[in-house]
């Protein structure tokens, strides 16, 4: 905790005075052009990877960067609410699904079975990625994990397209969807979709 408080002090002493005007302009409202859906993993920081400034990317982070299919029911849908705000209110022009290597959520999915109170159920969203990876691995030099990480990004993109106001804007040409995979060890992005 001390480390974080020290970090805050450095922010106040150096970053803040140098960027005060940026924050004060942003206080009037945000207008990011891109939404990033990233894993909550501490090694994958979209702001850092894209060298983005405050106000540039609207980010939602969850376990394994998943989006469930459109389901306007009585459940609590945190990620879907963020997606709705980005698309309908902020009118972002790009949505980037940012998957990554060594994803704990994907490892839990491959392992299968009930895990925790929430994780296993949440990872069911990407269940078809596990099936596809297990089916493809015999013909591929890649590992199940590697294939599954990439397939789950494709599933998330497909799920995002089930939201009618997303599909409408994609078809109208005012919104583009992208799926990228981040290799932690190499610090490199790979385009999947
Ligand atoms: Zn992850």
Image (cartoon, rainbow, N blue to C red):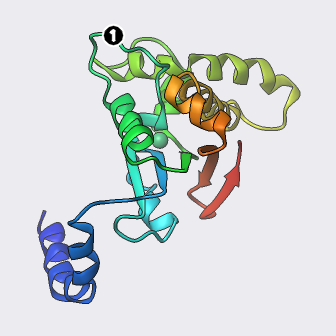
The N terminus is located in which quarter? bottom left
Q: Is residue 144 above or below residue 173?
A: above
Horizontal relation, residue 101 to residue 60: left or right: right
Q: Would you identify the image quadrant in which residue 151 lies?
A: top right
Pick whichever, 72 or 63, lies toward us: 72
Left or right relative to 128: residue 14: left
User: Quick check: can you spot residue 40?
Assistant: no
Residue 14, how many percent across, how many down?
Answer: 22, 88
Name the residue tied to disc 1: 73
83 vs 112, nearest the viewer: 83
Is residue 63 in sight in this rendering? yes
Residue plotted at (40% across, 43% down): 86
Residue 131 in the image: x percent, y percent?
67, 16
The residue at the point 46 percent across, 46 percent down is 38
Residue 185, x across and y down, in percent:
59, 60
Badge 1 density bin: few <14, some 14–19, many ≥20, Cα 10 Å: few
Q: Residue shown at 72%/35% (left/top)?
A: 143
Which one is in front, 31 or 97? 31
15 with respect to 111 (left or right): left
Q: Is mark 1 on a helix, strand or loop?
A: loop
- Name above or below for residue 145 compared with residue 136: below
Q: What residue do we see at 42% from left, 14% from top?
A: 71
Quarter of the image that includes the C terminus: top right
Q: In which quarter of the image is residue 43?
A: bottom left
Callout 1: CB less than 8 Å from ligand 1: no
Provide residue 99's location: percent of width, then percent of height. 56, 44
């Amino acid at each position: 905790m001390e480390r974080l408080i020290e970090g805050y002090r450095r922010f106040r002493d150096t970053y803040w005075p140098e960027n005060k005007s940026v924050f004060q302009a942003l206080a009037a409202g945000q207008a990011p052009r891109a939404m990033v859906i990233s894993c909550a993993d501490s090694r994958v920081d979209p702001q850092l990877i894209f060298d983005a400034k405050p106000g540039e990317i609207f980010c939602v982070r969850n376990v394994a960067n998943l989006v469930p299919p459109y389901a306007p029911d009585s459940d609590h849908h945190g990620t879907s609410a963020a997606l709705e705000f980005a698309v309908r209110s902020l009118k972002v022009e790009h949505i980037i699904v940012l998957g990554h290597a060594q994803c704990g959520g994907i490892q839990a999915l491959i392992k299968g079975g009930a895990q925790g109170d929430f994780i296993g159920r949440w990872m069911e969203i990407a269940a078809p990625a596990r099936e596809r990876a297990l089916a493809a691995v015999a013909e591929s030099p890649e590992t199940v994990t590697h294939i599954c990480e990439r397939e789950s990004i494709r599933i998330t993109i497909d799920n995002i397209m089930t939201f009618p106001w997303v599909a409408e804007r994609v078809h109208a040409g005012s919104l583009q969807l992208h799926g990228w995979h981040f290799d932690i060890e190499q610090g490199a992005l790979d385009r999947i979709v």
